[in-house]
Image (cartoon, rainbow, N blue to C red):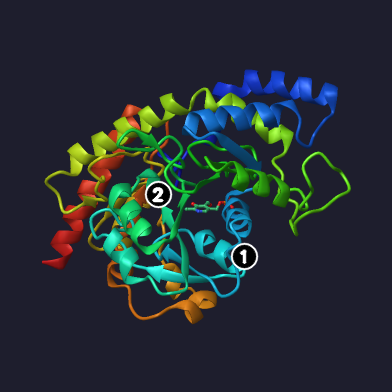
């Protein structure tokens, strides 16, 4: 079956930025400075400004950006970090890699994001931090989470891997916690041509420690003195060139995603398809268009027969994944129920009008066929 509507279209984005990247790479090859250097500094400055944060530190990927942040905050063995179970496994993985213990929290049935009540229910006297995940490109109620974290004396780290450019009451994702973590995996709203990531923060000391930890714990200005135990997690200059070129398009591409989501909302308004709700006060960037549907397998199969790709983010909540069972502490019913109903529909900046219509029609057809089947 040929694909009429792919899940995403990276090649269309690449075509748009190719001239700028060709030029940037030509200069880079001429200089042959592949680690650090001008392109990385240029991107770090631009990304900090875009996120409304004084510092950005480029790293190798989004998992490292979380792990390095935890390490630089001194969070490790004996400490607990609260993580919503409805997230990509890397959020919890980074906590374990830092030597700390993830404590899983449930999410809101409307947004599938962490709420202050879910967060507070997971707090213990060992809780040092909470990783607030802006899943699907949408920020949760950061005011009530901020108040709850202050009351508990717990640090907020934002996992904004899916939320480049999202805002909460006008404040950019990544700028509201002690640190904000980003992935630039190729399929993200801002994606490199391989793995890449960054941390943004207003805390200058934390920024310096992360700069050191990403580079073998080196002391600033010295090649041979190591002040911390670190790792190798630097942002490659060839990726920084790509990110600089794509950053110039990010707002336009996010706007395109928003208008596709509006089409989906209008099309499914009076159907049993329930798109994950926006948080009032937040402006999302729709990395994913996630709907809760009846009879998901039948619907996904129907879409496939029409040449429409779809996916699931994520079919197994973290606390139900084998290596994380030892951290699980009871049921998290909202996430468990959602995991069997959620379906991610195609959404990408270059999606054509006729492709959007095709998805809407096919989903509605599949839903009514599924309803007949139930009856
Ligand atoms: C929510 C979330 N957190 C963390 C990550 C990890 O990022 P990376 O794949 O760049 O390590 C991802 C991306 O895959 C993600 O979606």
Distance from mark 1 CB to nearest ligand 1 atom below 8 Å: no
Distance from mark 2 CB to nearest ligand 1 atom below 8 Å: yes
- Kindly indicate the quadrant of the structure image that contains residue 360: top left
Q: Is residue 162 left or right of residue 47?
A: left
Q: Is residue 307 visible?
A: no
**Residue of label 2:** 134
Q: Classify 10 Å Cα crowding around label 2: few (below 14), some (14-19), many (20 and above).
A: many
Instruction: Tell me which residue sits at (21%, 48%) in the image.
Output: 365
**Residue of label 1:** 98
Quick check: marks 2 and 1 in contact, CB under 8 Å?
no
Q: Is residue 69 left or right of residue 311?
A: right
Q: Is residue 197 left or right of residue 38?
A: left
Q: Earlier in the sequence, mark 2 or mark 1?
A: 1
Residue 187: image x %, image y %? 52, 42
Residue 278: image x %, image y %? 26, 45
**Gap in angstroms between the C-alphas marked 2 and 1:** 21 Å
Instruction: Tell me which residue sits at (68%, 29%) in the image.
Output: 41
Question: Where does the C terminus fall, quadrant-wise?
Answer: bottom left
Residue farthest along the right direction in this orientation: 224
């Amino acid at each position: 079956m040929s694909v009429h509507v792919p899940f995403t279209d990276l090649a269309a984005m690449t075509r748009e930025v190719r001239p700028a990247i060709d030029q940037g790479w030509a200069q880079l090859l001429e200089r042959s400075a592949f680690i650090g250097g001008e392109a990385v500094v240029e991107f770090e400055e631009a990304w900090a400004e875009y996120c409304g944060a004084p510092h950005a530190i480029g790293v190798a990927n989004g998992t490292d950006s979380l792990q390095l942040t935890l390490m630089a905050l001194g969070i490790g063995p004996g400490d607990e970090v609260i993580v919503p179970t409805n997230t990509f496994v890397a959020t919890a993985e980074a906590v374990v890699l830092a030597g700390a213990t993830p404590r899983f929290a449930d999410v809101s049935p409307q947004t599938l994001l962490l709420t202050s009540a879910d967060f507070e229910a997971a707090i213990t006297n060992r809780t040092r931090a909470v990783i607030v995940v802006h899943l699907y490109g949408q920020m949760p109620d950061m005011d009530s989470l901020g108040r709850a974290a202050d009351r508990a004396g717990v640090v907020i780290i934002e996992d904004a891997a899916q939320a480049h450019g999202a805002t909460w009451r006008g404040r950019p994702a990544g700028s509201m916690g002690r640190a904000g973590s980003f992935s630039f995996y190729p399929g993200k709203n801002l994606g490199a041509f391989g793995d890449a990531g960054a941390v943004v923060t207003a805390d200058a000391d934390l920024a310096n420690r992360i700069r050191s930890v990403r580079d073998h714990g080196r002391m600033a200005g010295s090649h041979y003195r190591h002040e911390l135990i670190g790792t190798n997690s630097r942002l490659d200059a060839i990726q920084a060139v790509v990110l600089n070129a794509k950053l110039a398009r990010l707002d336009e591409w996010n706007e395109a995603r928003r208008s596709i989501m509006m089409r989906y909302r209008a099309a499914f308004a009076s159907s049993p398809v329930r798109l994950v709700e926006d948080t009032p006060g937040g402006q999302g960037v729709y990395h994913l268009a996630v709907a809760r549907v009846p009879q998901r397998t039948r619907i996904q199969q129907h879409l496939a027969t029409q040449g429409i790709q779809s996916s699931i983010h994520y079919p197994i909540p973290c606390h139900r994944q084998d290596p994380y069972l030892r951290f699980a502490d009871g049921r998290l019913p909202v996430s468990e129920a959602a995991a069997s109903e959620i379906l991610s529909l195609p959404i990408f900046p270059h999606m054509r009008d006729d492709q959007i219509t095709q998805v809407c029609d096919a989903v509605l057809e599949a839903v009514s066929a599924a309803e007949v089947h139930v009856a």
